[in-house]
Image (cartoon, rainbow, N blue to C red):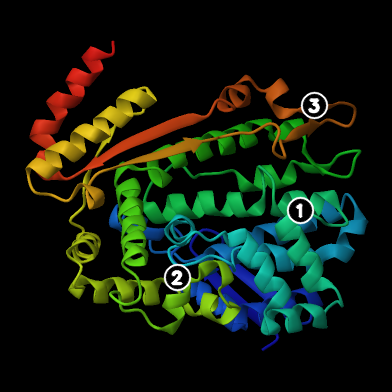
Amino acid sequence: MPTRTYYDPVHQSISLNSSIPEEMMVMELIDSSPFQRLRRIKQLGPAYLTFHGAESSRFTHSLGAFHLARRASNHLCKLDSKLKSHKFILYGAALLHDIGHGPLSHTSEEMFGINHEEWTAKLIKSNKEIVSILNKYGMNNSKEISNLIKSREAPQKAIISLISSQLDCDRLDYLIRDSYSTGTRYGQLDIDRIISAMIISPDGDLAIHPKGLMAVEHYLLLRNLMYRSIYNHRLNEVCNWLLEQIIKTARNLGPKIVWADKNMREWLWNHKEMSIDSFLSNDDTITGYHISRWQESISENLSNLCKRFLNRNLLKALNISSFSLEIRLEALAKARKISEKYSIEPDISCGLREQKIESYHPYKYGLRLWDGEKLEALEKVSPLVDRLIVPNQSSWLIYPKEIETELKPEIESLKIKHT
């Protein structure tokens, strides 16, 4: 088949032409088993329990990231023809940037203690199928793409920024896609304006023409809103906490008590030395199957945690972000004490879930404006972006609903006590 088209809900059609070598490489990578595995990994982890439409996969997102990288590349190549020779690296990195995700995407990083970027770099460099495809189109492609993902190393700075920066193709795609799949309306990005405003600065890196300033400001504000309303949503935090407790409890119980197949045993009790085959064997289906089996565990704690998650019998969460650390810890102690009074095990029903949201980080691959004469940091030009530098701290007290009536007055008294 000389051409192939994927009909995408946010980008419409994504077409590939096998007569173009770099696109033929992409087609082969898509057909590889490590990439097909991404169909079985939810883009937003357990967020489908909060937003019922959040069922899209890492496969879909990765195709979208590639599509945007290709669009940006075609635009930038008109400004700097040297970028054309690096399309294999850019396309491979954009498509494969999430191939190292574990079950339920980012949730697995806290559940199992893995790093998806490290695994992505490892798979690109060591998986025989991926290496064979990449190096067929260039001797050192797998090594160069692995280094780009792991260490931000590439022959052209603009290529690095399209893959890993505060305006990379990964972020541009997931903000639009996640907004669409969750049913929110924040993610109406002006992608055409953002891409057309991308230029090459005098040092060879990516910059933004002033005509795109408002579109980029909107993008950064949207990212802040998406984290506050979706990624760090109260119930999403509860689901993530429950999943962490499930794996933590299973690990602590050990292989003599907890049933797991051969590969899941590595994920649970040997994750730091896990083989590539064992890594690739796990996905949402396999992890979900184990959680389902553990409902019948002889461990009451493990069984109860799994039933809570599978039946969506979720714990409650109270926003205590405005409290000092001392008050937050006292609140947790109160919740644990009241839970014990009601004969509810506090270790699997009470906790603190804390996150820091950084909407813009000027010292971590920050953005710059270039008008042909003056190169300026984005936050120096935009008061809005400057205000986004201040991180938002979120803190949720997690507790069982059975104690809510008694707990809330106790929390209020703590607040008054420390005022």
Q: In front: 208, or 275? A: 275
Determine whether label 3 and label 1 are within 8 Å by CB.
Answer: no
* Mark 1 element type: loop
Q: Position of residue 238 (x, y in %)?
A: 30, 48
Q: Mark 3 and mark 1: span between their CA atoms? A: 22 Å
Q: In front: 72, or 378? A: 378
- In the image, which disc is placed on residue 152? 1
> Which tag, 3 or 1, sits closer to the chain's start?
1
Question: Which residue is drawn at the image coordinates 37% and 72% (left, top)?
Answer: 287
- Tell me the kind of residue under disc 2: Trp
- Tell me the kind of residue under disc 3: Glu
Residue annotated with mark 3: 376
Residue annotated with mark 2: 269
Determine whether label 3 and label 2 are within 8 Å by CB.
Answer: no
- Tell me the kind of residue under disc 1: Arg
Quarter of the image with the C terminus is top left
Question: Which residue is drawn at the image coordinates 61% and 32% (left, top)?
Answer: 217
Q: Using the image, determine if residue 306 lies above or below residue 129.
A: above
Which image quarter: residue 411?
Answer: top left
